């Protein structure tokens, strides 16, 4: 499952296609936020046991977005992003995406 990564894990290379594409599309390296992004709300989610330090990446991304005036809802939950984790959090995801926070 693609996620926000501090560094490209070689196992995730197929998701991105190349190291260059990873860096082009890594939100932690993206500086071209504009007025359209400030109209969005971003749901950020990671498990505290996710591999690759995803929880740290999500916290960094949350700070970057907030500093640019972009609304976020950030959750670092217990566990690892597996089927059980997603099932336990599905209602939160759907409520956010449905606009009923």
Image (cartoon, grey):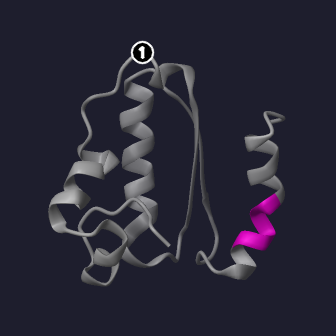
Q: Quadrant of residue 15?
A: bottom left
The answer to whether residue 40 is above or below residue 44 is: above
Q: Which element type, helix, strand or loop, lies under badge 1? A: loop
Give the left or right position of residue 92, taking residue 9 as reference.
Answer: right
Residue 73 image position (x, y, % from top left): 61, 40
| Outermost residue toward the front in this view | 17
Look at 30% across and 52% down and name the residue there: 26
Q: Which residues are magenta?
A: 86-90
The answer to whether residue 56 is above or below residue 25 is: below
Residue 61 image position (x, y, % from top left): 39, 45
User: In terms of secondary structure, what is the magenta stretch mainly?
Assistant: helix
Q: Quadrant of residue 100?
A: top right
Give the left or right position of residue 38, taking residue 67 as reference.
Answer: right
Q: Quadrant of the C terminus?
A: top right
Of residues 49 and 95, the one drawn nearer to the viewer in this rendering: 95
Residue 8 image position (x, y, % from top left): 25, 70
Residue 56 image position (x, y, % from top left): 39, 59
The answer to whether residue 32 is above or below residue 74 is: above
**Residue annotated with mark 1:** 35
Of residues 21 and 40, the one drawn nearer to the viewer in this rendering: 21
Look at 55% across and 20% down and name the residue there: 39
């Amino acid at each position: 499952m693609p996620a926000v990564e501090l560094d490209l894990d070689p196992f995730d290379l197929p998701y991105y296609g190349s190291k260059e594409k990873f860096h082009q599309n890594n939100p932690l390296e993206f500086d071209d936020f504009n007025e359209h992004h400030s109209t969005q709300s971003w749901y950020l989610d990671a498990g505290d046991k996710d591999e690759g330090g995803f929880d740290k990446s999500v916290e960094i991304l949350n700070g970057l977005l907030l500093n640019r005036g972009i609304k976020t809802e950030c959750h670092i939950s217990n566990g690892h992003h597996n089927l059980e984790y997603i099932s336990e959090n599905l209602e939160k995801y759907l409520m956010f995406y449905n606009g009923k926070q």
